[in-house]
Image (spheres, grey):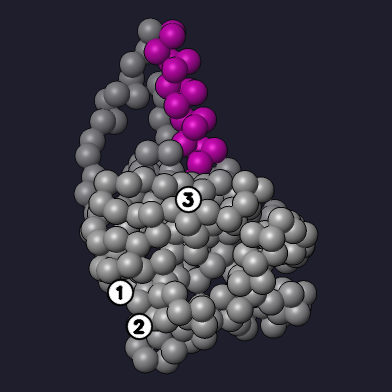
Amino acid sequence: MVSGPRPAPLPGAVGLSHLSAYDWEAADGVCGGTPHLHLVCTEAYVVTGGRGAVQTLSPDGYRDIPLAPGVVAWFTPGTVQRMVQGGDLRITVLMQNSGLPEAGDAVFTFPPDVLADPEVYAAAATLPPGTGADTEAAARRRRDLAVEGYLPLREALVAGDAGPYRDFQRAAARLVRPQVPDWRELWRAGALAAAERTGAQLTALADGDPAHLEEATAYVSGPSRRGGYGMCGRRDEYTLPGTTAPYDVTG
């Protein structure tokens, strides 16, 4: 009989949240979120309302991708992304390797001197708990500092110089290197475990054993926190069963 830990995670052990993009104006006159990249996670935006854009920096250069209801856009590791508010932009976010972004996989485009010092970076990246005025002010300062570091990266890439963008990627990799062993354990408990369960189920079916189907059931969940301050906007979060930490409620 094939079995696995219960309750089951979302398909593929992905993370889920809803975002309403920030409408704070930045130094370049653009309203929107905090530029950042992910080191090992692909992120997808499913646009559910409003309009806006996402600015990206990658080896492909600089792109400004329009966002409107029905659009799905996704970004592979290393892509710098900046959500732009165009009017009531609302997005459902699907995140590969649930738990890793919360564990530090996302790195903000802070200026090089901030990225060079892990303690300074952590102080700038961490928000106070809660959803009050102090948290909002800290989230806005964090966004503005990331935009300060992002604009030179974009300017250089548009001019054909990928050097600063590459330097940022390397700085981000150095910054997170000490955390990789912990990330590996999260991945093993989440996305890898989900894939291995599928492999075991396929083996069982090939042997004529459908016993795992006896565990069939359904789950439902709602937001565990509304209006939190995320990287790109106000964030409705889900405490989903069976996913990797920090959302693992099974102990």
In the rendered image, residue 100, in percent from the top left (x then y), is placed at: 54, 56
* Chain part drawn in magenta: 190-207
On the rendered structure, is 209 left or right of 168?
left
Closer to the camera in the image, 246 or 38? 38
Q: Amino acid at mark 1?
A: Gly
Query: At numbered mark 3, what does the secondary structure look like: helix, strand or loop?
Result: strand
In the rendered image, residue 158, in percent from the top left (x then y), is placed at: 64, 59
At horizontal 54% and vertical 38% (from top left) the residue drawn is 192
Residue 131: mark: 2
Query: At numbered mark 2, what does the secondary structure look like: helix, strand or loop?
Result: loop
The quadrant of the rendering that contains the C terminus is bottom left
Question: Mark 1, mark 3: which one is toward the viewer?
Answer: 3
Closer to the camera in the image, 107 or 250? 107
**Is residue 40 something that shows in the picture?**
no
Tally the marks.
3
**Is residue 234 something that shows in the picture?**
yes
Residue 43: mark: 3
Residue 119: mark: none
Sooner in the amino-acid sequence: mark 3 or mark 2:
3
User: Distance from label 1 to label 3 (Cα)?
Assistant: 20 Å
Q: Are marks 1 and 2 in contact (CB under 8 Å)?
A: yes
